Image: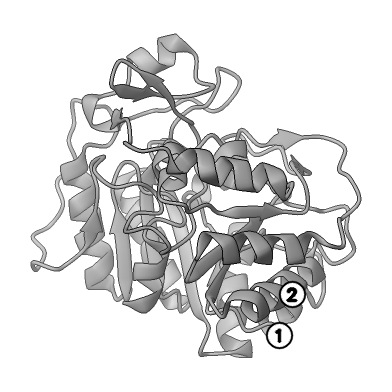
Amino acid sequence: MPDSQPISLPMLPMLEVETTSGGSGCCGGSSKSSGGSCGTGGCSDQGGLLQLEGVPAALDRRLPRWLKRNVPKGNADGFTDKLLRELNLTTVCEEAKCPNRMECYSQKTATFMIMGEVCTRPCGFCSVAKGKTQALEIDEPERVAEAAFRLGLKHVVITSVTRDDLPDGGAEHFYQSVLAVRARTGAAVEVLTPDFIGKPGAIERVCEAAPEVFNHNTETVPRLYREVRGRKSEYAWTLHLLRRVKEINPTIKTKSGLMLGLGETREELLDTMADLVEAGCDMLTLGQYLQPTFEHLPVTRYVPPEEFDEYGAAAKAMGFASVSSGPLVRSSYHAREMAEH
């Protein structure tokens, strides 16, 4: 879709949809509320605005104004960073170079990334390192729980790299992490998992821990699935995972996210949202894809905030219980608020 051809969406009823054109961070809300997010493009202080960390300057200069961020005030980000280093924990906020990382850290929030810093899937959009993985750290669930306790989190988001090298894809580690966080904090827990494709019993094991929210990102439309997510990923399996969670435990809220700006058409996007509703997905996030390096997939289009508003309204009208839609929205944007909606 060329930039000169703006999308024309049908008239939709006025609905309350959480959107952001850069005012709120990926975790959004107040301190002690939720986890952060997964996304591409980090941030560093430059002249009162945040420049995308790890993104070549030539790419950063092309960004529209609505993707620039104000530098957050205060030094709580230092507290969060120090705590994470003390407990030897990884966050997807840092590893995936999320553009909202500084704001989330300044609000004492983060999305914990378990099972290491190396992923076994070569996704074309993600800046997390790929290669040889390391053995799981048995005490990691307790360290995550301790960090959540010290940060005072009421809604804890736990994600991971994809571990195709493990027999269960890391499902047991997710299970133990959910139980540890709940025992230490009493907080609600949201898991953002890989697809566990080819791992019998993995979805079921995570569901045994009864996380309040089971999040698995769709990322893009079916036509672009293999290009964006790699050869091992399957669109049909993503839908199966979301359906399966509801079959196992209907009380678990399911959630997914889509990135815009990878070459999808309006019709493809709306069809994908309809598939997610049919699969029983309760919550949806829509955000702008940002190219982290020249080696990653290019951005085909920067979608303006007004269009995100329209897509958010369309998603709400389709039947999603909660929707967050905006250029800087990421998987865990306003995670607690969405879960409690």
Which residue: 30% across, 15% down? 47
Question: Could you say which quadrant of the image residue 321 lies in?
Answer: bottom left
Q: In this view, does 22 lie to the left or right of 126?
A: left
From this view, report whether residue 22 is shown above or below residue 185: above
The crowd level at tag 1 (other Cα within 10 Å; few <14, some 14-19, many 20+) is: some
Q: Can residue 216 be seen in this view?
A: no
- The secondary structure type at the circle numbered 1 is helix
Along the viewing direction, whichever of 216 and 92 lies nearer the viewer: 92
Distance from Cα at disc 2 to Cα at disc 1: 7 Å
From this view, report whether residue 265 is shown above or below residue 159: above
Q: Where is residue 48 in the image (x, y as percent from the top left)?
A: 28, 21
- Residue identified by numbered label 2: 175
Q: Where is residue 249 in the image (x, y as percent from the top left)?
A: 59, 89
Along the viewing direction, whichever of 97 and 13 lies nearer the viewer: 97
Question: Could you say which quadrant of the image residue 265 lies in?
Answer: top left
Q: Where is residue 211 in the image (x, y as percent from the top left)?
A: 59, 78
The crowd level at tag 2 (other Cα within 10 Å; few <14, some 14-19, many 20+) is: many
Which residue: 49% across, 66% down? 153
Q: Which amino acid does label 1 sit on?
A: Glu
Point out the residue furthest to the top here: 58
**Residues at marks 2 and 1 touching, judged by CB atoms closer than 8 Å:** yes
Q: Where is residue 55 in the image (x, y as percent from the top left)?
A: 50, 20
Q: Is residue 188 left or right of residue 166?
A: left
Q: Can residue 92 be seen in this view?
A: yes
Question: Could you say which quadrant of the image residue 182 lies in?
Answer: bottom right
Q: Is residue 284 left or right of residue 194?
A: left
Q: What residue type is labelled 2?
A: Tyr
Q: Residue 208 carries which label?
A: 1
- The secondary structure type at the circle numbered 2 is helix
Along the viewing direction, whichever of 45 and 333 lies nearer the viewer: 45
Quadrant assignment for the C terminus: bottom left
